[in-house]
Amino acid sequence: MPEFKVLERVYGFDEVTLIPGDVTINPDQTDIEFKLGELTSSIPILASAMDGVVDPSFAIKYSKLGGLAVLNLEGIQTRYENPDEILAQIAQARENETTALLQKIYSQPIKERLIGERIETIKKAGAVCAVSLTPANTKRLSPIAKEAGIDVLVVQSTVTTARHISKSYKGLILSELCQMLSLPIIVGNCCSYSAALELMRTGIDAILVGVGPGAACTTREVIGVGMPQVTATIECTAAREAYVKESGKYVSVITDGGIRTGGDLCKAFASGADAVMIGSPFAQAREAPGRGYHWGMSHPHPSLPRGTRVKVGTKATLQQILLGPTSVTDGTQNLVGALRTGIGVCGARTIREMHNTRMVIAPSIKTEGKYLQATQLVP
């Protein structure tokens, strides 16, 4: 019988493992800097542009630690004068009321004045300011954000492509946006070689990789699309390497979503990522605005929500989650320490050297020999 479709085998973080190098390197001798245009971050981990993760206060604190937090310019911070009151309402809502409440909250118009105020708050504190917009609002709101002093713009939606077919007026042209703003632009999300390569050809500086892996995202359930993160990152990395040969320009790959532990983090970099973006782990920080809750950017969609509110709890300070000392053994704290250790064990000195780490398929890697952990009773 003739074939109609041939299914490929693709892989997520839980299905692979990294092989140690023949030489090991002290963690403190590894270099994990992330460069984006003229900016350099000492921590290659971006905080997701989600209202339960990043507000101006969080962005300032994270910048001072050496990372880059992305503020959602279409969220609660720019719709309400008193965002803390709204965030409290979301945290206190009953589970069966959450979606309707979020749809109501996000139906309020974006106030352009608040865009400038939130950005200025971050900049006046001496912090690097990165902001996120959806493609539909980028042409209208990005000039306001630039005038207020942003350092980085993230253009982000569930799935973003270089070509978009619509009956509406002329849509967003990324090449024109790059020329107009003249600052680092990150675009996402994508998960395939061809889509990544086309996006890179528009002149952007980095791409976000990941469709549906986030803890608060339900895209894979609602519309059935997505790609496991290891394979998605490898494909987009292949596009990056092809584009370097084609143009001489290096476009950074940022794995976005699905990263919960230090092990996931190391696997993302071994897959080819130059940086990662995470949400839920940061939503657990005491400094996060979500009060122990986290919700997807598409949750408030008026007709087809593709996210949900999840309870993540408040587990530790931002510094503990990033730099330790850790109080748990599950790999969810001291992410930077885990990354440095993982890179060193794999014999790499830099993130780019980590890209060459040998990776193998190992679906039992987290259960092999762990029968005592699996059967231990929790008091």
Image (cartoon, rainbow, N blue to C red):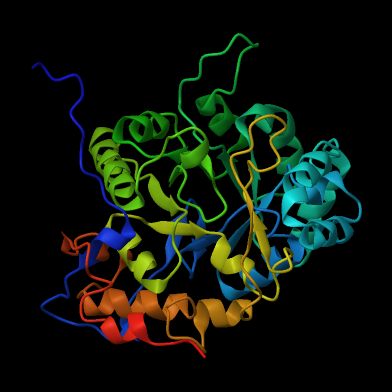
Instruction: Give the left or right position of residue 58, taking residue 188 as reference.
Output: right
- Determine the image quadrant of residue 353: bottom left
Where is 253 relative to 267, above or below?
A: above
Instruction: Give the left or right position of residue 373, taking residue 147 as reference.
Output: left
Q: Position of residue 248 (x, y in %)?
A: 29, 40
Farthest-out residue, right: 81
- The structure residue drawn at horizontal position 43% and vertical position 80%, both measured from the top left corner, is 330
Instruction: Give the left or right position of residue 250, taking residue 71 as reference.
Output: left
Image quarter hosting the N terminus: top left
- The structure residue drawn at horizontal position 63% and vertical position 41%, both measured from the top left corner, is 298
Q: Is residue 53 visible?
A: no
Where is 268 relative to 61, above or below?
A: above
Farthest-out residue, left: 1
- The structure residue drawn at horizontal position 38% and vertical position 49%, both measured from the top left corner, is 253
- In the foreground, 325 or 314: 314
Where is 166 relative to 152, above or below?
A: above
Q: Position of residue 55 (x, y in %)?
A: 73, 60
Q: Is residue 302 visible?
A: yes
Q: Position of residue 214 (x, y in %)?
A: 50, 53
Q: Position of residue 354 (x, y in %)?
A: 26, 65
